[in-house]
Amino acid sequence: MQNQFIFLFLFLGVISIFAQEKTQITSKDSLKSEKFDPLRPSKAAFYSAVLPGLGQIYNKKYWKVPLVYGAIGTSTYLYIDNNKKYNLYRDEYKSRLEGLESGSDFLAGLSESQLIAAQKQFQRNRDLSALFMVGFYVLNIIDANIDAALSQFNVDDRLAFKPALIKNDITSNNNFGVALNYSF
């Protein structure tokens, strides 16, 4: 009798082992989380500091690169042009103080006060161009940093901020409002 219990126990154990199926339950995750890189803004800012426009390329905002180079390039051109004109009027003024004659008919027709005024104007324009050049360079770095930080925010369709038209049942008037919807 004891052998029969052992045999019955082994037989039921083997049957229960083979009766279990190997099914895997997989659940589809509806929340696909993208990788969050906390160093992404600082990388973009560093790249833009090394080479203007490189942070925009890192952020895949290729359309901003011509704007960056256009702004910095225009400021650089204006700086160089105003510096040349400043040096031209300054050299003419210095040569007049030394008693030398002018090599240009146009500059020879100007008085000393006009030469000084032209020098001041071109010096001011040169300094403003340098300020704009530095400003656009810094703006390029800030833009790359902020764009990289904002690119990681969740902006899917389940989070919506939309204008809404609400029908008032009591007065039968339409009311305008704003609805903030978040669906799970």
Image (cartoon, rainbow, N blue to C red):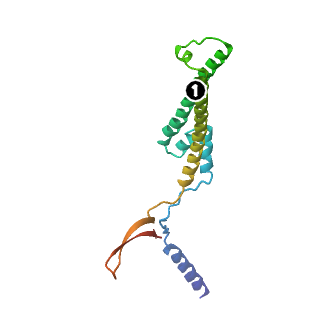
Which residue sits at x=54%, y=79%? 11
Task: Say which of 1 and 169 sits in front.
Answer: 169
Q: How many numbered marks appear? A: 1
Q: Residue at 59% of width from left, 31% of height from top? A: 126
Q: Is residue 51 visible?
A: no
Q: Residue furthest left?
A: 172
Quadrant of res 115: top right
Alpha-carbon neighbours of circle 1 within 10 Å: few (<14), some, or many (≥20)?
Answer: some
Question: Which of the two residues, 99 or 78, is positioned nearer the viewer here?
Answer: 99
Q: Residue 25's spot in the image, x, y percent? A: 49, 69
92 left or right of 177 in image: right
Q: Is residue 146 above or below residue 112?
A: below
Point out residue 84 in the picture as x, y percentages from the top left corner: 58, 23
Give residue 14's position: percent from left, percent from top. 54, 75
Position above or below: 163 against 97: below
Q: Which residue is mark 1?
A: 118
User: Is residue 111 shown above or below 44?
Assistant: above
Q: Is residue 93 left or right of residue 183?
A: right
Residue at the image position 66 percent from the left and 18 percent from the top: 94
Percent x, y of residue 138: 60, 42
Residue shown at 60%/33% (left/top)?
124
Quick check: can you spot residue 4? yes
State the residue in front, 75 or 113.
Answer: 113
Which element type, helix, strand or loop, lies under badge 1?
A: helix
Q: Amino acid at mark 1?
A: Ala
Q: Give the quarter of the image for residue 160.
A: bottom left
